[in-house]
Amino acid sequence: MSKRDFIRYSLLGLGSSAVSLKAARALAKGTILKEGATPEPGDRMWRWSKESPYYMVTAKGVKCQICPNNCVMREGAESICRTHVVKDDKLYSIAYGNPCSVHIDPIEKKPLFHYLPASMSFSIATAGCTFACLNCQNWEISQKSPKETENVDLMPDKVVAEAISKRL
Ligand code: SF4
């Protein structure tokens, strides 16, 4: 893999812009998750739940160590970012492999200065955010849980395969 290709592939995961389910469907061969994928009440786990590598169990509950919010949660509570839940004293992300935004964007749309000009980037995002900025341009997905958005089944290996197949 050339240096240029490496840099291009490393752009996967950059923040996204507007939701485009049409593009996402085409990209992921039409697997939309919402139907039949809703977790059971009181259960909150689903196929896209993945145990977090960064948490500790405290007397007050499970403490997430991913961002400075340091949420401390018991089972049934919702994290500030809306993407983490507690089950059996373990912390899980419920956003793993189910982005609600998948886009192929010109690199100039990204917050980068003169970086591989005129190239394209593969941009994905899941619902939820650790912030609640009043001027957020992605508020329709940033202030929702992955359970509330229409998502695409796109596990990490498929993200890489799709990006390579599109020669991004
Ligand atoms: S906002 Fe989300 S990532 Fe941040 S500490 Fe809370 S659960 Fe963890």
Image (cartoon, rainbow, N blue to C red):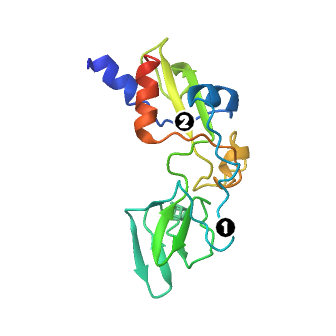
Residue furthest top as drawn = 118
Q: Is residue 40 above or below residue 143?
A: below
Instruction: Out of 14 and 124, give the one closest to the viewer.
Output: 124
Q: Is residue 131 visible?
A: yes
- Judged from this view, the residue extending furthest toward the front is 36
Q: Does ligand 1 reach within 8 Å of label 2's beta carbon?
A: no
User: Is 166 located above or below residue 128 in the figure?
Assistant: above
Point out the image quarter for the N terminus.
top left
Say whether residue 137 is left or right of residue 117.
right
Q: How many marks?
A: 2
User: Which residue: 31% across, 24% down?
Assistant: 6
- In the image, 75: left or right of 90? right
**Can the viewer see residue 135 in this picture?**
no
Q: Residue at x 73, y 45 (%)?
A: 140
Q: Secondary structure at mark 2?
A: strand
Say which mark, if any, is on residue 66: none
**What amino acid is found at the position of numbered circle 2 in the picture?**
Ile
In the displayed structure, does residue 97 sit left or right of residue 151?
A: left
Numbered disc in front, either 1 or 2: 1
* Mark linked to residue 124: 2
Mark 1, other Cα within 10 Å: few <14 / some 14–19 / many ≥20:
few
* Residues at marks 1 and 2, CA–CA distance in whole angstroms: 27 Å
Q: Where, quadrant-wise, is the C terminus in this rendering? A: top left
> Which x, y percent locates residue 145?
66, 56
Of pointers 1 and 2, the one earlier in the residue sequence: 1
Which residue is label 1 attached to?
A: 40
Disc 1 element: loop
Residue at 45% x, 25% y: name it: 163
Residue 65 in the image: state x and y as whole percent: 42, 66
- What is the three-letter code of the residue carrying label 1? Glu
| Within-10-Å neighbours for mark 2: few <14, some 14–19, many 20+ | many
